[in-house]
Image (spheres, rainbow, N blue to C red):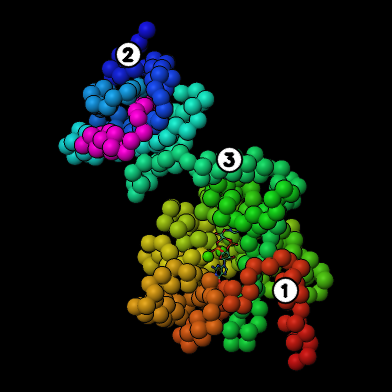
């Protein structure tokens, strides 16, 4: 019994599953792939052009898939704008499908190019149900969605491991926070004129009981997506405050710690109260805590961040614009923004290799900072030549592997001691 999808003429979901299963069972050796497609922002097309245009688009896709001249292939619509095609795993077929759909997406509307996202699962496990195979194609599709640089996503071990790892991270995060598995490490900032530490940046590390140390690039992007970053950041900020209080109580010299504020944090209505509250709770001076806000945050919602920045500044905090030079509208923003220090990542400037422009750019940025009466710190400094060059152009504060990697708190405390001794001696 074959049930066709009324609107588009391809098979409806259950019939597709059944037909695809039959094809896989009756072909030896069965070497097939499933291509899944989904129209980007289909709801917007409905909204702008009307639902009948949306329907006609689905019909056109259905018709295109029905007319594929590929032996042993079958197409179906799972729901709404989600179509699937099963066909023999051969690049020429894959390219054919992509090419005719491309033509359709360009020509269907006269002033609007329809974007279609594709995911492919090359069937390696014939024991899976067709529905699970379509899920895998969907994971591949999602990995490519919104990324116009890649034509389609493909399900492979790498993607599978990435997804499993993400699920693991998400399943563990709340427990990890409760069990205090997140630690702060400190990376010192140096004054290059006397080679002394002037402060540090708190960088989070996750000490997982089974895996050991995990670095932020592996979990921060996931937490930024699912919102957990707000909780983690607040925890990290409080850890930094506890440390400052400990130093004060033990009579140590206090060197400021800078903390990272994620762009999502900016949208918390109680951000300023929270940070000011921490400082009050631990009886700290606000200048001991510096706030690093990444440059790209400034482009998201300019007004919001200007307002928040003014309030934070009023509360006595020093603001650093992190990763300066990596985004776009930074120069414009400098006009309206109350920042104190530009934090320049050499990493973003090193890429131009031989042609020597990067040193001119650096030089100009440092001069601009001086001119605007802003502080400047360079991070990602790895070589002596870089330190010398920066010193020459008037940038005397640096952070980077040349001086020190981020280190555990106790190690940083040992590094702080000589500074204190020096002072006692002088
Ligand atoms: P970031 O804020 O730009 O921090 C600087 C990163 O550069 C750190 O990586 C640091 O270890 C690394 N780095 C420092 N000096 C050098 C160097 O000379 N060469 C090279 N190649 N790298 C250097 P890390 O600790 O892995 O952190 C990566 C990013 O994760 C941070 O970039 C920051 O965006 C984020 N992050 C870390 N901790 C937190 C946190 O508590 N909250 C939030 N929201 N983000 C955090
Ligand atoms: Ca930072
Ligand atoms: Ca940075």
Q: Is residue 417 above or below residue 143?
A: below
Cα gap from disc 1 to disc 2, whole angstroms:
73 Å
Q: Which residue is mark 1?
A: 254
Q: How many marks?
A: 3
**Residue depicted at 53% across the width and 75% down the height:** 381
Apparent side of residue 215 relative to residue 13 in the rendered image (left or right): right
Apparent side of residue 241 relative to residue 215 in the rendered image (left or right): right
Indicate the position of residue 295 as horizontal and vertical percent values: 47, 62
Instruction: Name the foreground residue: 207 vs 393.
Output: 207
**Residue depicted at 57% across the width and 52% down the height:** 218
Q: Quadrant of the C terminus?
A: bottom right
Cα gap from disc 3 to disc 2, whole angstroms:
36 Å
Q: Which residue is mark 2?
A: 4
Q: Nearer the viewer, mark 1 or mark 3?
A: 3
Q: Quarter containing ligand 1?
A: bottom right
Q: Is residue 266 above or below residue 86?
A: below
Q: Which residue is mark 3?
A: 164
Q: Secondary structure at mark 1?
A: loop
Q: Secondary structure at mark 2?
A: loop
Crowding near the residue tagged with mark 3, few <14, some 14–19, many ≥20 C-alpha atoms within 10 Å = few
Q: Work out whether residue 296 can be spotted.
A: yes
Question: Which residues are drawn in magenta?
Answer: 79-103
Q: Earlier in the sequence, mark 1 or mark 2?
A: 2
Q: Earlier in the sequence, mark 1 or mark 3?
A: 3
Please say if the residues under marks 1 and 2 sit with CB atoms less than 8 Å apart.
no
**Residue depicted at 53% across the width and 61% down the height:** 293
Q: Secondary structure at mark 3?
A: helix
Cα gap from disc 1 to disc 3, whole angstroms:
43 Å
Quadrant in which residue 151 is drawn: top left
* Residue at the extreme bottom: 426
């Amino acid at each position: 019994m074959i049930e066709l999808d009324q609107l588009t003429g391809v098979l409806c979901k259950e019939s597709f599953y059944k037909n695809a299963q039959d094809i896989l069972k009756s072909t030896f050796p069965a070497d097939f792939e499933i291509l899944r497609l989904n129209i980007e922002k289909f709801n917007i097309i409905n909204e702008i052009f009307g639902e009948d245009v949306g329907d006609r688009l689905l019909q056109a896709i259905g018709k295109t898939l029905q007319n594929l001249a590929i032996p042993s292939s079958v197409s179906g619509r799972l729901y709404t704008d989600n179509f699937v095609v099963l066909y023999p795993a051969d690049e020429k077929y894959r390219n054919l499908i992509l090419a005719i759909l491309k033509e359709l997406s360009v020509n269907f509307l006269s002033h609007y190019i329809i974007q279609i996202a594709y995911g492919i699962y090359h069937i390696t496990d014939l024991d899976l149900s067709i529905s699970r195979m379509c899920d895998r194609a969907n994971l591949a599709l999602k990995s490519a969605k919104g990324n116009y640089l890649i034509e389609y996503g493909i399900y492979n071990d790498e993607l599978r491991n990435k997804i499993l790892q993400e699920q693991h991270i998400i399943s563990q995060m709340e427990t990890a926070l409760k069990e205090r598995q997140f630690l702060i490490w400190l990376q010192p900032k140096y004054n290059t004129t006397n080679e002394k530490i002037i402060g540090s940046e708190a960088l989070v590390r996750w000490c997982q009981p089974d895996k050991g140390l995990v670095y932020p690039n592996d979990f921060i992007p996931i937490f930024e997506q699912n919102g957990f970053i707000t909780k983690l950041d607040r925890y990290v900020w409080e850890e930094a405050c506890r440390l400052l209080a400990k130093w004060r109580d033990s009579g140590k010299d206090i060197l400021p710690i800078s903390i990272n504020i994620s762009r999502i944090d900016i949208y918390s209505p109680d951000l300023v109260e929270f940070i000011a509250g921490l400082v009050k709770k631990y009886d700290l001076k606000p200048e001991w805590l510096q706030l690093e806000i990444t440059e790209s945050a400034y482009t998201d919602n300019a007004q919001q961040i200007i307002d928040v920045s003014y309030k934070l500044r009023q509360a006595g905090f020093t603001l650093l614009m992190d990763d300066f030079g990596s985004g776009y509208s930074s120069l414009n923003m400098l006009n309206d923004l109350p920042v104190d220090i530009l934090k320049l990542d050499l990493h973003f400037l090193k890429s131009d290799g031989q042609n020597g422009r990067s040193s001119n750019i650096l030089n100009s940025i440092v001069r601009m900072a001086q001119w605007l009466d802003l502080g400047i710190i360079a991070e990602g400094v790895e070589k002596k030549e870089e330190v010398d060059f920066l010193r020459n152009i008037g940038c005397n504060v640096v952070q980077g592997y040349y001086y020190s990697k981020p280190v555990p708190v106790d190690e940083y405390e040992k590094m702080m001691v000589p500074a204190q001794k020096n002072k006692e001696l002088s």
